[in-house]
Structure formats: C-alpha cells, structure tokens
C-alpha cells in the first residue's frame, strides 16, 4: 500500500524521507529520521517500533545493513515488514519480507533507497532512486522529484491518498515535517505545494527555536 524513499544529502548531511500510500496518515506510522544518524521507512504491514529500533542501532554505531540485520533479528512477524534505512555515511539497506503485499520490490544506491508494495509495476522503486539522483538542489526538492518520478512510473496499483516528507538537520527535531493525511486528489502534489511555502521559512523556524532574539519577524499582522 506504499512507496517511499530514504535519503541522505552528501553535501549537507541532512536526512530525509518521503512516502505515499493509499492508506490514511501514512507518514504518522512509517517515517522516521534522526539528525546525524539516518532515516528509516517502516512500511507494508506496518510495525511502528521498527523505525526507532533501526535508528537506535545506527546511533549506537551500526551500519544501515547491520541495523536492518538487527531489525530482522528483533522484529516480530518480520516476514510481513518492509524496512528501508540509510546511515550517516550514506550506506543503504532494505528488508522486504516475503509476505509483502502485491507487486513489491526495492532499489538502492549510495545515499538513497526506495521500496514499495502493492505497486502498479516493479519499476517504481528504481524510478524513485533515479529521480532522486538526477535531481538537484535542497534535499526537499530532490525528495519531491523522486516521489513524482515514482508516481509517473506507475506508483501504487490504485490511487494514493496520503503522503509525507520529513527532513532532519543538526537539531534534535525535524526541520521539516509535512503531511497530507487524506485527500481524494494527489497527496504528493499537496506535499509539494506545502514545501514551496515552507522551504523559504525553514531556516527562520530553526533560528526562532535556537534564539528568537536573532530571528526575522514572524510575518503576522502586528509584527512587521
């Protein structure tokens, strides 16, 4: 019911994840990232404990592949799970259990990995990886480009209704966490529109948290 990617920006060290599904609120259950550590997607028949588990293992010094091995060893009903990880050196690893739904497959490269289930065809994850690697600019721009490439390649077998994009960078909270939890239209385009609005303000929101005395105006009436 899902297709996604996890990615690292080699220039900035930022991590990001983008995901879409026919199910509601997919990013609330499936998207995990931690600054300086990595990004993880835990999907298919979702176990939300697997994302934090993989991040904890990578924070303890494990590679993405070793973290996925830990997930395989410690996770319950792992044959139903699909888990993607990228670590602080851009190494990637994927577990796709044999009970993943429908057409399922995966693709990976340095700094990016993609997987999906109930897909329209088995080319979608590779299209997502290629879309990310061919795109330029901010990691958020590249995540959007990759998801659009996956959708153009066929996406899910049926319509998608929710999507999300999460980005982490240096601080302990996500610097961007954009979600469309349900729509009859294209949720990926909803996220893309939100990103266009949010991107120019991203650094200001971080600055306001770190030291509001140095922050730009809040841009609301009465605070010009």
Image (cartoon, grey):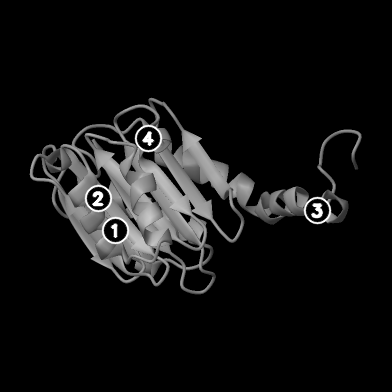
In the drawing, does residue 199 fall left or right of residue 87?
right
Q: Tell me the tag on residue 147.
A: none
Along the line of sight, which residue is nearer the eye, 5 or 195?
5
Residue for badge 4: 29
Along the line of sight, which residue is nearer the eye, 42 or 179?
42
Q: Position of residue 53 (x, y in %)?
A: 35, 48
Which badge, 1 or 3, comes first in the chain's sequence?
1
- Tell me if mark 2 has few (under 14), some (14-19) or many (20+) residues whose alpha carbon lies within 10 angstroms of its own: many
| Vertical comparison of 213 with 222: above or below | below
Q: CA distance from mark 1 to mark 2?
A: 6 Å
Say whether marks 4 and 1 touch (CB < 8 Å). no
Say whether marks 1 and 2 touch (CB < 8 Å). yes
The residue positioned 61% from the left and 56% from the top of the image is: 171
Which badge, 2 or 4, comes first in the chain's sequence?
4
Q: Secondary structure at mark 1?
A: helix
Residue for badge 3: 211
Say whether marks 4 and 3 touch (CB < 8 Å). no
Residue 119 in sight from this viewpoint: no
Q: Tell me the tag on residue 71.
A: 2
Closest to the camera, between mark 3 and mark 2, is: 2
Q: Position of residue 187 (x, y in %)?
A: 41, 36
Q: Position of residue 151 (x, y in %)?
A: 30, 46
């Amino acid at each position: 019911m899902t297709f996604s990617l996890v990615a690292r920006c080699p220039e900035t060290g930022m991590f990001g994840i983008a995901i879409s599904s026919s199910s509601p609120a997919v990013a609330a259950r499936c998207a995990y990232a931690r600054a300086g550590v990595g990004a993880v997607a835990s999907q298919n028949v979702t176990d939300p404990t697997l994302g934090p588990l993989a991040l904890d293992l990578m924070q303890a010094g494990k590679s993405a592949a070793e973290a996925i091995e830990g997930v395989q060893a410690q996770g319950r009903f792992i044959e139903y799970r699909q888990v993607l990880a990228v670590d602080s050196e851009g190494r990637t690893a994927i577990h796709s259990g044999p009970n993943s739904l429908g057409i399922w497959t995966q693709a990976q490269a340095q700094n990016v990995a993609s997987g999906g289930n109930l897909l329209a065809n088995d080319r979608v994850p590779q299209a997502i990886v290629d879309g990310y690697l061919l795109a330029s600019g901010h990691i958020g721009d590249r995540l959007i480009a990759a998801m659009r490439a996956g959708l153009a390649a066929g996406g899910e077998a049926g319509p998608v209704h929710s999507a999300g994009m999460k980005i982490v960078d240096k601080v302990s909270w996500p610097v961007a966490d954009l979600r469309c939890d349900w729509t009859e239209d294209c949720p990926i385009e909803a996220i893309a529109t939100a990103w266009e609005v949010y991107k120019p303000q991203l650094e200001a929101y971080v600055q306001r948290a770190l030291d509001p005395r140095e922050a730009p105006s809040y841009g609301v009436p009465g605070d010009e």
